[in-house]
Amino acid sequence: MIYFDKVSKIYSDNSVALSEVSFSVAPKEFVSIVGHSGAGKTTLLKMLLAEERPSAGSVFFESLNVHNLEKTSVTKYRRRIGAVFQDFRLLPHKTAFENVAFAMEAAGKTDQEIGSDVPHVLELVDLGSKMLNFPHELSGGEKQRVAIARAIVNQPDVIIADEPTGNLDPINTFEIVQILKKINDLGTTVILTTHNKGVVDSLGKRVITLDRGKIVRDDRAGKYSL
Amino acid sequence: MFWVKVKRVVWTGFVNFWRNGFVSLSTVLVMTVTLFVIGSLLFSNALLNASLSELQDKVDVNVYFLTSASETDILSLKKSLEALPEVAVAEYVSRAQALDNFKKRHENDALTLQALDELGDNPLGAVINIRAKETSQYEGIAKFLEGKEVLSKDGVSIIEKVNFYQNKAAIDKLTRLIDSSERLGIAVALILSVLSVLIAFNTIRLIIFISREEISVMRLVGASNKYIRGPFVVSGVMYGVVAAVITLIVFVPVTYWLGSATNQFFSGINLFNYYLDNFVSVGLVLVGSGVVLGAVSSFLAVRRYLTV
């Protein structure tokens, strides 16, 4: 479903983010990508989101070469991916409801669909009572759950989560990982980057280990080991 | 779907304007200053034009004829003067009228009137008062009259004198004054409007700079460029409209206060009355500039951050 073909990203001679990384992800898979800070995890996800271009190699999503897409096609392509970030990236002047609704509006959904799906998804992440709160009125864990709701509301093929638990306490971390697991159980591919050993070990799913821009391990049911 | 999107864009623009309260307020204030400058330029232009045309109205050239000149000759000269493109008005004052005017002017001066009676005959010649369309054209008219001096019976000129040369220095000075004040007016207006437009433009750019993260998040969520840009442009239009309305309201007391002063200084134009008479056109100019400025600035400023 997703295929990285010898992807390199070189910012400058002494700053190589990725070097000839190749791997593939099957549909409905749950993949954790682990590694130290600066190992290239975030760059990898930015490539998949077409946020950055590789210096060499290509990234395929099904049969699409992600970096050959026109600007308007990039927009449509991104609607098939739900992204969750460490710093939440919610729109600060929109309520939780509006943040989730924005993703649906952007995808051209009708007002009826938005009216029924958004509350449903927010209930799913247990935020039914805080729909009308602004991000600054929510805790870190709640913000991240809004972000997840926004990521899944368009029923994407893949969820990308870039250190989603990086700013959260252990209880919230556990909850977020449970939600991601549930999403995966319902049939959505999940790609998670993290450097939280506990999270990776509790999942018992495939683990790709990056070190200085290179894949050093790829274990089917791996543990966090560096 | 198109209209649904338009509705969402407009609504989001309104909501953003409202929720960004403080930021919106400061942008509106900067825009108000800009529009105030533009409005003031309109007013000072009107004042300048009014006082210049009044000065111009005061300038004319008088052709004095000999008492012996026949009326038909004078009238034919008047006709050929009126045919000149430079001449706005050529007014004929006959000998009898000239005498009447003279008597009226001196009605309290018994001595002069008595002296006039003693003469028996009307000593005053006929006059043509010429007003040119522009002060710079008097010279040409005077030249034309010089050439026409041959037009006379028995080879004697019927024109006694043309007072252009007496007034020449004053007319030349006025011509230069009018020219340079018009040029200066345009230059000042251009510089001030460019400066204030730049300030407003940069303010809006700063506001959108603050929102650059938001714009990139919208891109990553899969929103199209138009859908992201739309609400910013709508907010920009709102800054312009609100600022224009504030400016129009502020101008009411300002012009009222300046009204009587301008009436005395630039005799004939009361700024307050001018504002009320031209309210619709001033309003259109201000709202139009506000809307264009807000929309274009937002449109251009957002573009920078849509590259994600």
Image: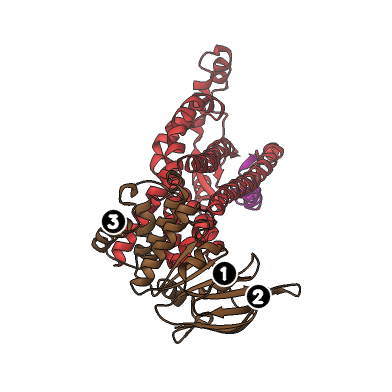
The mark nearer the N terminus, 1 or 2, is: 2
Spot occupied by residue B74 in the image (x, y as percentages of width and height):
53, 45
Residue on which disc 2 sits: A213
* Chain A as rendered: colour: brown
Given the image, on which type of amino acid does mark 3 rest? Pro
Q: Identify the residue at horizontal 51%, vertical 43% (top origin).
A: B27
For disc 3, the neighbor class at 10 Å (few under 14, some 14 to 19, many from 20) is some
* Chain B as rendered: colour: red
Magenta stretch, residue numbers: B136-162
Marks 1 and 3, how far apart at CA = 36 Å
For disc 1, the neighbor class at 10 Å (few under 14, some 14 to 19, many from 20) is many
Q: Identify the residue at horizontal 55%, vertical 51% (top origin).
A: B210
Residue A79 or residue A184, whichever sits in front: A184
Q: Is residue B275 above or below residue B183?
A: above
Residue B32 or residue B248, whichever sits in front: B32
The mark nearer the N terminus, 1 or 3, is: 3
| Mark carried by residue A224 | 1
Mark 1 touches mark 3? (CB < 8 Å): no
